[in-house]
Amino acid sequence: MRNITLIDAVREAMDEELARDQRVFITGEDVGRRGGVFRATMGLYEKYGPDRIVDSPLAELSIVAIGIGAAMAGLRPICEIQFADFIHPAMNQIMNEAAKMYYRSNGAWPVPMTIRAPYGGGISGGLYHSQSVEALFAHIPGLKVVIPSTPYDAKGLLKSAVRDPNPVLFFEPKKGYRAIKGDIPDDDYTVPIGPVNVTKVGTDLTVYAYGMMAYYTLQAAQIVEQQDGISVEVVDVRTLLPVDRTGILTSFKKTGKALIVYEDNLTMGYGAEIAAILASDGFEYMDGPIRRLAGPDVPGVPYSHPVQEAFMPSPQKIADAIRDLAAY
Amino acid sequence: MADFKKADLLDMYYDMVLIRRFEERCAQLYQEGKIGGFLHLYIGQEATGVGAVRAIRKEDHIFTAYRDHGIAIARGLDINALMAEMLGKVTGVSKGKGGSMHLASREHNFWGGYAIVGGHLPLAAGVALRARYMEEDFGVLCLMGDGATNIGYFHESLDLSAVWDLPVVWLVENNQYGMGTAVKRASGVEEIVKKAQAYGMKEGPRCDGMDVIATYEAVKEAMEYARKNGPVLMEALTYRFVGHSMGDPERYRTKDEVRQYSEEDPIGKFGAYIKSKKKGTDAELAELDQKAAEAIEAAVQFAEESPDPTFESLFEDVYVD
C-alpha cells in the first residue's frame, strides 16, 4: 500500500499499460520530452522511447482523429488533450467518427482508444483553462465518459479505459492532481467502468457528485455530520456514461432526498440527467425536492480570485446546501 | 507505359461500365422513391476511381468521401450488397444503417465513404500510423474532393503525415467544383498539388483523371513512393457529368461546358484505346456492356427482394461488450 497523488496514479496507470501491451502508445502536445504540461507522462518518454510516447503538433483535431484511425487499425492509443477546454476542435471526430464507427460498421471496426483531458476550475486558469465539458460528451451514445475523484479510482479506471474496446473520455480533475492523495495497492488492479461508488454511507440524504466535487462533498459531509448531526450518503458518479441508473436509484430509495453537485454550468448539466432519473424512476421514494448545486449559467469561469470562488461550489457551499435540504 | 494484358484492360473497362450502369440505375431508383436521402453519382469520374483503386494492392487500404459508389465497386465489393445498401436493406454492405454515403467493407480494407467533408483524412493518417508503428508494409489511399482541401482537417492531416512520414497517397479527385463552387473561388491556389509545398511533402502529379491508364500509372508510382518514403499529394483532374447530388439545378456551370466534357467520355475513350491496341473488339466490349447491365438488374432484384433491417438492429453495435 502506498499513498500517492492523483496525478501520480494517472502516470502509474499509463506506465503499467504501456509495459503490458505493445499496442498502447501515447500522443499529445508535449507528452514526450517535456513530460506533459501537468507532468502526467513524466519519465515515460525516457522509458518507452519516441515511437510510443509521441509528441504531436499543436493540433487537437488530429491528435484525436489519428488516434481513432490507429484504434480502428488495432492499436490502443491514449490521446492527451492538454486542457479539456481545447478538445472542441476534435468534437466532430469524437462525435461523428469515434462514437459512430462501431455502429456504422456493424461491429467491424471497434475504436479502442482513451482520450485524457484535465478539466475543471479553481486553479485561476481563467476562461479557457477551467471548463467542465463532460455533459457535452455524456450526451453521445457510443462513448464512455469517466471522471475519477481518488488516486485509487484514477489508476484503476484509467487502466480499464485503456483496456476497454470502446472510446473512453477520461476527464481528470486538475485541481485535485496534487491536492488529492490516497492509498493504492502495490499489485495490478482495475476499477470497472460503469458502476457508481458509494464513498460514504449515510441515512438522511444522498449527495451525487464526481471529480473534484466528489472530493469536496466528502469534506462537506464530515462538516455537517460533526456540526449538525446530519448523516449524508455520498455517491461518486465516477462513470457518467453509460449511466448507472440502478446504482443511482439505490441510494435514493434509502434516503429519499438528493442533492447533485457539479461544477459545470447548472443548466443542461449532468445533474439534470440524475434528477430526471430520480424523478421518473424514484418518485415513490421521494421525500423532498431534488436539488442541484452547480456552477452558474455564465459563459466561463472568470480569472479573478473572488469571482472564481463565487463560481465554484466549495465544501462550505455544499455543506450549506446539505443543511437546507436536510431541513426540508 | 505499363504493359497491360488484355484481360486487365477488359476488367478495367468492365468495372467502369459497371459503375456507370450502377449509377444510372440508382438515379432511376431515386426518382422512383426507392432510394432516399441524398445521392451523389460518380458518372464521369469512373476512370479516376477504377485507375486509382486498381493501382494499389489488396493489403493497402482505402478511404474516400461520400461520392463512394464507384470506389466500392472498383474495390470489388459485392454489387448485390451495394445495391441492397442503397435500398436500405439488411443484406447491404452496412446492413442498411449507412446508405449511399457510408459504404464500407473490412475484408476489402475499404474503410468507407465519409459524409463529413474532410473528416476521413485524419482517420486515414491514423490507419497509416499502424504501418509505421508495427513496421508493416502497407499504404493508405485517401481520396477526397477538391473542396476538402480547404477545410482544417486537410491541413492537420497532411502536416502530420509529413512529420511522421506516413505512407499515404492523398489523392484529390478534382472535378472542378466543391458542390457548386469552382475551385478558384474556394482555394488560394488552383493547382491543388502545390499545397504539398506547405508541408514539405512530395508533390505528386496532376494526372488526367479521365484516362484510366494515366491515373493507374500515376497512383501506382505514388503509392510505391509513399510506402517507402512518406506521403504524396496528387490530383486526378476529372469532371462529373451529372449534378453534385440528385436535384442539383447546376446553375454554377453552363450546359456547353458539361456537353464539351461529356464528349470526352472516359468509357468511350478507353474502349477506343483498347480497340486501337488490338486488345479487344467491338463485339467483346458489347458483350461486357451486356454483362454489366445484367449484373445490375440482378443486383436490383436482389436488393428489392431483400428484407428490411429489424427494429432490434437499431440497438445493435452501440458498444463493444
Image (cartoon, coloured by chain):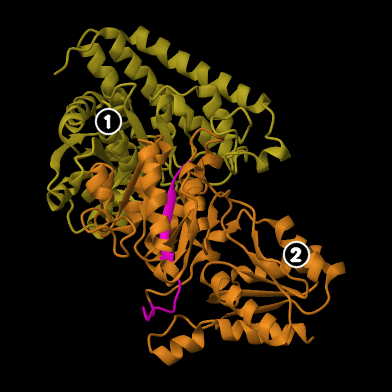
Q: Position of residue B150 (x, y in %)?
A: 28, 56
Whether residue B6 is visible: yes
Residue beneath the point at 55% across and 83% down: A296
Q: Which residue is mark 2?
A: A251
Q: Look at mark 1 in the image and give the residue it sits on.
A: B139
- The residue positioned 57% from the left and 19% from the top of the image is B298
Q: Amino acid at mark 2?
A: Ser
* Residue type for callout 1: Gly
Q: Number of labelled discs?
A: 2
In the rendered image, what is the letter of the chain coloured yellow? B
Q: Which image quadrant: the C terminus of chain A?
A: bottom right
Image spot of residue B2 (x, y percent): 16, 16
Look at the picture and state if B306 lies above or below B3.
Answer: below
The x, y position of residue A104, in whole percent, is 54, 40
Q: Secondary structure at mark 2?
A: helix
Q: Is residue B139 left or right of residue A303?
A: left
Magenta stretch, residue numbers: A111-127
Chain coloured orange: A
Magenta stretch secondary structure, dominant = loop
Q: Nearer the viewer, residue A36 or A61?
A: A36
